[in-house]
Image: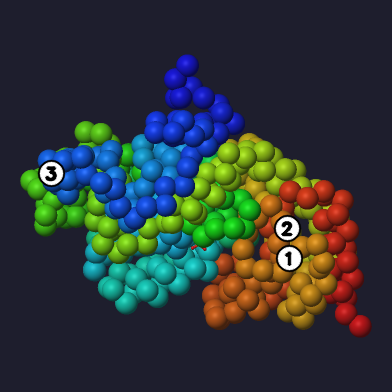
Amino acid sequence: MSSDDWGFDTAQVHAGASPDPGTGARATPIFATSSFVYDSAEQAAAQFLLDDVEGFGYTRMGNPTTAVAERRIAHLEGGVSAVATASGQSATALALLNVLRSGDHIVMASQIYGGTTNLLGQRFAEIGIALTAVPVDDHDAWRAAVRPSTRAFFVESLGNPTGAVADLEALAAIAHDEAGVPLFVDNTLATPYLLRPLEHGADVVVHSTTKFLSGHGTVIGGVVVDGGTFDFGARPERWPGFHVPDAGHGEGGYWERFSPQRQAYSRRLRSTVLRDYGPAPSPFNSFLLIQGLETLSLRMRQHVANAQAVVEHLLAHPQVERVHYPTLSGTPWSAAAQRLLPKGGGAIVSFDVAGGLEAGRRFVDGVRLFSHLANVGDVRSLVIHPASTTNSSQSPEQRAASGIGPGLIRLSIGIEDPADLLADLDRAFRAALGG
Ligand SMILES: *Cc1c(COP(=O)(O)O)cnc(C)c1O
């Protein structure tokens, strides 16, 4: 049986790994080495000219422990290859800088992780890359935002924190047929267990592996998965980075050299932007990521079941004004959610607590089992009040555009016993009443 036929539960344990040829070690070892000895002057030269695609030279560009995590995530997402980075932020930055240059423009969904808004809206503005943010479900607004300089669409499959679901097929059609640009999808909150964006028209998937893929709140990491689908050869004048040979990389551009293997995007990513900007992951973190990947589906099944129990509890609670969860009916994206999320809406549940800002602050002070912190995707249940923390630097109008009201509470539901989670939430609701 070929690994292509493996089910998800098998692939998350086996894909991309084999026993270590030197020692027979069955688990993937931590290759804690900065550099690798060349076999010969010829092999060394080939690596620098990018002809040797498999070998390792220096851990900033690749490492055997990290490579197992990369191959496994590429397999789980259905991509042709993947490049791991030191954080989710650097995955997003590198994924986009691989195709963008000063003077270019991005269209992004407004319901998005605050760190992505800062990166694309502020840091990229400083280097001459413009941004337009539009509601994820307003497809006419996406069309209207496209300029001659647009080079990327960026969206989250499940938006953080209100669970807006991107209609990936519709956005891919606009990106490809009308704008002529690739569709980038941050799939952090869905994970490939719930949704594989490349099967629905996305060209590149990014993750913060800090979250569900590692799963235990122990590492910071990111990954970029190349679907190998976007045709950077169709309008070469738009993508000079793929057609003009890079200094020191021999004859021919990346498109000419690597499009036959459908790896022009990921080869360029590793050999230029990762090499030159340098946010490589530590092999130790890659090892922890691999441990997390091996139980991804088991954890996601429990995350989703617990989240569903919490959603039902919140819907019936008198102190809850509104519940936000991807698969709830009556939202602008419920049709997309029904089509894209047959296994459930993930672990992030948000709600507006009655009493607004002050009640929200009292709520997070009232939990004992939930941890009050700024992360998601841990086996532990987590809670945060975005208006006073993660999104406090934004204006109330900016927060409103992302769906964040003054009393919004974001929960990341862990894998504990659901009854214990509901009891802790009720304790926090009593605290939210004050007095
Ligand atoms: C956390 C997160 C990021 C940023 O990842 P880091 O690993 O914290 O750098 C990006 N996108 C989403 C959806 C996230 O939740």
User: Is the residue marked 3 within 8 Å of ligand 1, measured from its CB?
Assistant: no
Residue occupying the point 71% across, 56% down: 380
Q: Residue 41 carries which label?
A: 3
Circle 2 sits on which residue?
381
Question: Which amino acid type is shown beneath numbered disc 2?
Answer: Ser
Instruction: Say whether residue 102 is left or right of residue 302.
Output: left
Callouts 1 and 2 close, C-beta under 8 Å: yes
Q: Say which quarter of the image contains residue 370.
A: bottom right
Query: Real-space Cα distance between discs 2 and 3?
Result: 53 Å
Task: Determine crowd level at label 3: few under 14, some 14-19, many 20+ residues with C-alpha closer than 10 A.
Answer: few
Q: Residue 371 carries which label?
A: 1
User: Is the residue marked 1 within 8 Å of ligand 1, measured from its CB?
Assistant: no
Question: Which amino acid type is shown beneath numbered disc 3?
Answer: Ala
User: Is the residue marked 2 within 8 Å of ligand 1, measured from its CB?
Assistant: no
Instruction: Say whether residue 226 is left or right of residue 369.
Output: left
Image quadrant containing the C terminus: bottom right
Nearest to the observer: residue 70 or residue 311:
70
Is 22 located above or below residue 170 in the figure?
A: above
Question: Which amino acid type is shown beneath numbered disc 1?
Answer: Ser
Q: Which residue lies furthest to the bottom in this view?
A: 435
User: Can residue 420 be seen from the camera position used here?
Assistant: yes
Upstream in the sequence, badge 2 or badge 3?
3
Percent from the top left, x then y, of residue 398? Answer: 54, 75
Q: Is mark 3 on a helix, strand or loop?
A: helix
Percent from the top left, x then y, of residue 300? Answer: 66, 43
Percent from the top left, x then y, of residue 33? Answer: 37, 52
Upstream in the sequence, badge 3 or badge 1?
3
